[in-house]
Amino acid sequence: MSAIDKLYGPVTIVTVNVEGKMNGITVAWATRVSWHPKIVAVSIGKTRYSRELLDKADKFAVCIMGKGGREVAEYFGTVSGRNVNKFEKISYELSKSGLPIPSGTIAYLECKKTNQVEAGDHIVYFGLVEEEKVLKNEPPLVFGEGQIL
């Protein structure tokens, strides 16, 4: 284990809907970067199919997962949307903007993609929060030391 593994963060699923193709990826690197206006950043590996879709997307959702979303988060983190429609196996709702919100989500942020920056083996996407909703008032799942806690 390295010192960087001690940086804990919320377990989120970042979702997109590009030309009717819905996808999502479990992300442990999501954070707010500005209060006024509200802006968040998410980091996606360059080789991920979700990164290809995010490059084409105008909007994305950051779905913060609660304790009831552990299995969904594990599924979205281990199966590629390149080969499987992840939303066929789990229940979800669509946000105002038509972004999928998977079961187990306790809160979500609908974001307009504003910028992206290369960061090593990842791309960091910045999103202006346009809508937000708390679905369940409970602590989020967290990721640290290489695992969902």
Image (spheres, helix red, strand yellow):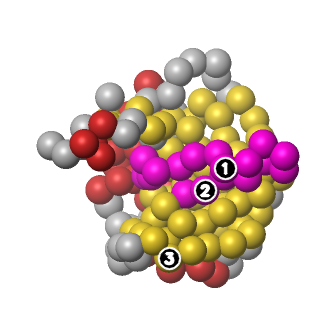
Q: In terms of sequence position, does the residue under pointer 3 or pointer 1 come before the other?
A: 1
Image quarter of the C terminus: top left
**Magenta segment boundaries in residue numbering:** 26-42
Q: Pointer 3 and pointer 1: residues touching (CB < 8 Å)?
A: no
Q: Is the magenta stretch mostly helix, strand or loop?
A: strand
Report the side of 143 relative to 123 (left or right).
Answer: left
Can you identify the residue that label 2 sits on? 41
Q: Give the residue displayed 44% in from the left and 30% down from the top.
A: 141
**Secondary structure at numbered mark 1:** strand
Q: Which of 60 and 118 is in front in this view?
A: 118
**Residue that mark 3 sits on:** 118
Quick one: 77 or 128, which is closer to the camera?
128
Among the two numbered marks 2 and 1 on one chain, the one whose residue lies closer to the N terminus: 1
**Could you tell me which residue is drawn at 35 percent across and 53 percent down?**
77
Q: Is any atom of residue 131 visible in this view?
A: no
Q: Residues within 10 Å of mark 3 (few under 14, many from 20)?
A: few
Amino acid of disc 1: Val
Judged from the image, the secondary structure of the residue bearing numbered disc 3 is: strand
The answer to which quarter of the image holds residue 60 is: bottom right
Question: In terms of sequence position, does the residue under pointer 2 or pointer 3 come before the other?
Answer: 2
Viewer-proximal residue among 134 and 44: 44
Report if the CB atoms under discs 2 and 1 are less than 8 Å apart.
yes
Reply above or below: 135 against 84.
Answer: above
| Farthest residue, direction top | 138
In the rendered structure, the answer to whether residue 5 lies left or right of residue 49 reads left
Task: Based on the picture, tell me whether residue 146 belongs to the magenta stretch.
Answer: no
Q: Residue at 45% across / 38% down in the picture?
A: 9
| Viewer can see residue 7 | yes
